[in-house]
Amino acid sequence: MAEAMTKEKEVAEQAGRAAKRGVQRVAEGEPTRAVMEVQEMIPVPLLAYAAGASILASAILFGAKRRDWSLFVGQWVPTFLLTGLFYKLLRPSKE
């Protein structure tokens, strides 16, 4: 309990020192808003097609005995799919 209190005081002191130096904290939501603005420019089906193309490219590379490249390209698939899912779940409502 006492340890948590000292941690809170330490964080508050650091914030006070940063404010004196003129360092401003980024308002919560600004980075997310920037990510959403970029994501709105990318059609969501394009991410699904990119994931499918990555699977196909990975299979072709594997067949060509380029195993390292195959694994590298194959790891793009979850990135594309999760990016689309992130946008679908967290985008602000249009209402």
Image (spheres, rainbow, N blue to C red):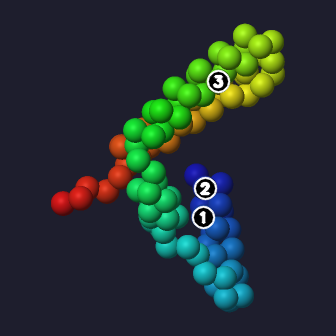
How far separated are the C-alphas under marks 1 and 3?
51 Å
Which amino acid type is marked by label 3?
Ala
Is residue 32 visible to the viewer in this orientation of the structure? no
How far separated are the C-alphas under marks 2 and 3?
51 Å
Is 69 above or below relative to 4?
above
Which picture quadrant has residue 2?
bottom right
Near-viewer residue (13 or 83): 83
- Image position, residue 35 (x, y; %): 50, 59
Instruction: Choose the circle earlier in sequence order: 1 or 3.
Output: 1
Whether residue 85 sits left or right of residue 20 in the image: it is: left
Instruction: Choose the circle earlier in sequence order: 2 or 3.
Output: 2
Residue wearing tag 3: 57
Q: Classify mark 2: helix, strand or loop.
A: helix
Residue at 48 percent across and 38 percent down: it is 47
Q: How many circles with numbers are drawn on the protein?
A: 3
Residue wearing tag 2: 4
Is 75 above or below relative to 40?
above
Whether residue 46 sits left or right of residue 11 in the image: it is: left
Residue at 64 percent across and 24 percent down: it is 57
Give the number of the disc on residue 66: none
Residue at 72 percent across and 10 percent down: it is 63
Residue wearing tag 1: 8
- Image position, residue 49 (x, y; %): 47, 33
Whether residue 85 sits left or right of residue 1 in the image: it is: left
Circle 2 or circle 3, nearest the eye: 3
* Mark 1–mark 2 CB contact (< 8 Å): yes
Q: Classify mark 3: helix, strand or loop.
A: helix
